[in-house]
Image (cartoon, rainbow, N blue to C red):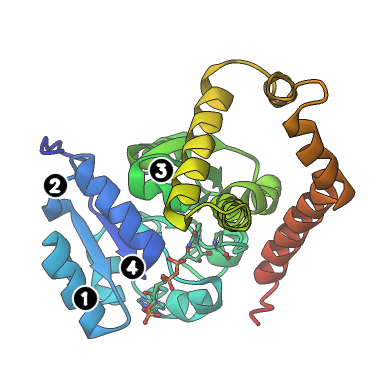
């Protein structure tokens, strides 16, 4: 997209790795002026890469904290404490701090920054790269309605947004933040099944990916319940019911429930500083 619009504020992405870069690229596609975007990195070569790829200014965390109105913290949860130590002397309560880190609570961040600093917790997912992300948003103690709207404006550039109470963030991380990985895992496994059934890998891949896209669009647009959509595919004494019986025999439904519960639990652990 080439249109530009003038946001009222400068936004810095601190810890620009996979999610930070995806968000940055989405904001640029969405028309944010490059002059209003800043990034920070831990390594010089990464800073050079981002400058070359996006033409964005890369600086230190302290400089970003002094210059940007909104700071998006996109480092790993395990690196958050160190990043906050670096930022604390420079972040005033006029800044808005948005964290995209799994597990890290708004209170964890508030306790380490100037009293009264507004903090928002967001859980995005990697489809922000193709403007089909979902970003789940919760405000901390000092975040106002205007701050939440500003966060929605930023993350809304790369997909949908949903506000939830922060108590639901660990569950949303399990469902939505990690969610794309489960679908990639299923595609990988189903492509292997295609190989077993004698199809070339590229054809098996294309068939499964198109089935996934078609199913996703129907789930989103048909207004039908997933059970109804599955029943429509499942003919009496047909092929699909044989596959469904095997899925149930192998406990796939129970495995998915247990898997998402494990992801939720890990998100909670990250909040308590259990980093390994
Ligand atoms: N990947 C995903 O699907 C999602 C991730 N998240 C969350 O986003 C965050 C980032 O994840 P992801 O992008 O995958 O991880 P990455 O490791 O790709 O990105 C994190 C980046 O932060 C940099 N970094 C660490 N400490 C500092 C510091 N003090 N100053 C500047 N830069 C620093 C790292 O540098 P270096 O390159 O040197 O390691 C790295 O480039 C995590 O908290 C994760 O929970 C949220 C939703 C989805
Ligand atoms: O696996 C993780 O911890 C991150 C958070 C959600 C998706 N990826």
* Numbered disc 4: secondary structure: loop
In the rendered structure, find residue 33 and report the number of the disc placed on it: 2
* Numbered disc 1: secondary structure: helix
Q: Residues within 10 Å of mark 4 (few under 14, many from 20)?
A: many
Q: Are marks 2 and 1 in contact (CB under 8 Å)?
A: no
Mark closest to the chain's N terminus, 2 or 4:
4
Q: Nearer the viewer, residue 21 or 236?
A: 236
* Residue at mark 3 to residue at mark 1: CA–CA distance: 24 Å
246 versus 188 height, above or below: above
Is residue 209 found left or right of 150 in the rendered image? right
* Residue at mark 2 to residue at mark 3: CA–CA distance: 17 Å
Mark closest to the chain's N terminus, 4 or 1:
4
Q: Are marks 2 and 4 in contact (CB under 8 Å)?
A: no
Mark closest to the chain's N terminus, 2 or 1:
2
* Numbered disc 3: secondary structure: helix
Q: Residue at x 47, y 81 (%)?
A: 82
**Is residue 135 at least partly visible in the picture?**
no
Mark closest to the chain's N terminus, 3 or 1:
1
Q: Residue at x 32, y 81 (%)?
A: 42
* Residue at mark 2 to residue at mark 4: CA–CA distance: 18 Å
Question: In this figure, which residue is indicated by the disc labeled 1?
Answer: 47
The image quadrant where one finds the N terminus is top left
Is residue 233 found left or right of 38 in the rendered image? right
Q: Residue at x 28, y 71 (%)?
A: 40
Ligand 1 within 8 Å of disc 4? The answer is yes
Question: In this figure, which residue is indicated by the disc labeled 4?
Answer: 16
Q: Quadrant of residue 77?
A: bottom right
Give the number of the mark in front: 2 or 1.
Answer: 1
Q: Quadrant of residue 138?
A: top right
């Amino acid at each position: 997209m080439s249109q530009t619009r003038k946001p009222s504020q400068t936004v810095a992405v601190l810890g620009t790795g996979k999610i930070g870069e995806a968000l940055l690229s989405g904001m640029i596609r969405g028309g944010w002026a490059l002059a209003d975007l800043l990034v920070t990195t831990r390594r010089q070569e990464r800073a050079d890469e981002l400058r070359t790829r996006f033409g964005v200014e890369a600086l230190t965390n302290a400089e970003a904290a002094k210059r940007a109105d909104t700071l998006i913290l996109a480092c790993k949860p395990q690196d958050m404490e160190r990043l906050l130590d670096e930022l604390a002397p420079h972040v005033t309560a006029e800044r808005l701090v948005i964290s995209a880190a799994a597990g890290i609570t708004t209170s964890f961040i508030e306790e380490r920054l100037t009293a009264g600093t507004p903090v928002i917790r967001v859980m995005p997912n990697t489809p922000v790269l193709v403007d089909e992300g979902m970003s789940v948003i919760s405000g901390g103690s000092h975040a106002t309605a205007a701050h939440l709207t500003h966060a929605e404006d930023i993350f809304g550039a790369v997909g949908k947004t949903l506000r939830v109470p922060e108590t639901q963030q660990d569950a949303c991380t399990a469902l939505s933040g990690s969610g794309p990985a489960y679908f990639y895992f299923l595609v990988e496994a189903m492509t292997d099944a295609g190989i077993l059934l004698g199809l070339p890998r590229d054809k098996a891949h294309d068939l499964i990916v198109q089935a996934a896209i078609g199913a996703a669009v129907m789930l989103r647009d048909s207004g039908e319940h997933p059970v109804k959509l599955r029943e429509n595919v499942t003919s009496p004494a047909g092929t699909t019911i044989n596959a469904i019986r095997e899925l149930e025999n192998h406990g796939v439904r129970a495995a998915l429930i247990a898997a998402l519960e494990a992801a939720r639990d890990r998100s909670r652990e990250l909040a308590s500083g259990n980093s390994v």
